[in-house]
Amino acid sequence: MHVRLMKETRFSKQCHNFVCPVNSTFLIFILNLILQGDLGPFNPGLPVEVPLWLAINLKQRQKCRLIPPEWMDAEKLEEIRDKERKEDTFTPMPNPYYMELTKLLLNYASDSIPKADEIRTLVKDTWDTRLAKLRLSADSFVRQQEAHAKLDNLTLMEINTTGTFLTQALDHMYKLRTNLQPGESAQSQDF
């Protein structure tokens, strides 16, 4: 199973409405967005919360400086990574779109994020640890021929990463079980 880390996915589009604080470099009282409503006031140096897509757009036009989320801190991410490595189960992530937000913020505003390279490494380490746990869980699930499993604290991107594999494995297990049921005819039926 090959995972393309930090590649834009359909999930990154879902996090574009994540509210991101910015420090604007321009003055405007109210910015009216059709589907977002009124935003502002934008005063130079004062933080205002805007959707991530707008924050990235303003940053690209050098109209603001992005303020990273509280969890996007090297010390906090190191604690999250270490906790994930110690626990057998999946630990809660600071944001359901932590991977996608990290990718977007580091790609478009790394100069606004202290220790950006260290943060990128910590998030990737956490991601790798979680995927290794997911692979082990899936392997154990298939080997034990379980009918269901409960995996708490996974993000949509993590589920999507192994979704195809698990679906195919479950399908094969179902076919094997239905063909081996006692008392049924010797001929197999393909559903």
Image: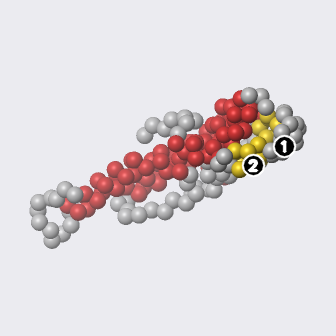
Disc 2 is placed on an element classified as: strand
Position in image of residue 60 (x %, y %): 71, 29
In front of the other: 31 or 96: 31
Please indicate, yes or no, whether residue 80 appears anywhere in the rendered image. no
Q: How many marks?
A: 2
Q: Quadrant of residue 25?
A: top right
- Residue sitting at 55 percent across and 36 percent down? 8
Q: Which residue is mark 1?
A: 29
Position in image of residue 29 (x %, y %): 84, 43
Please indicate, yes or no, whether residue 187 appears anywhere in the rendered image. yes
Image height check: is 14 above or below 7? below
Q: Is residue 40 left or right of residue 95?
A: right
- Residue sitting at 37 percent across and 52 percent down? 167
Q: Quadrant of residue 78?
A: top right
Alpha carbons under labels 1 and 2: distance apart: 10 Å
Q: Residues within 10 Å of mark 2 (few under 14, many from 20)?
A: few
Residue 38 marker? 2
Mark 1 or mark 2: whose residue is earlier in sequence: 1
**Quarter the C terminus occupies:** bottom left
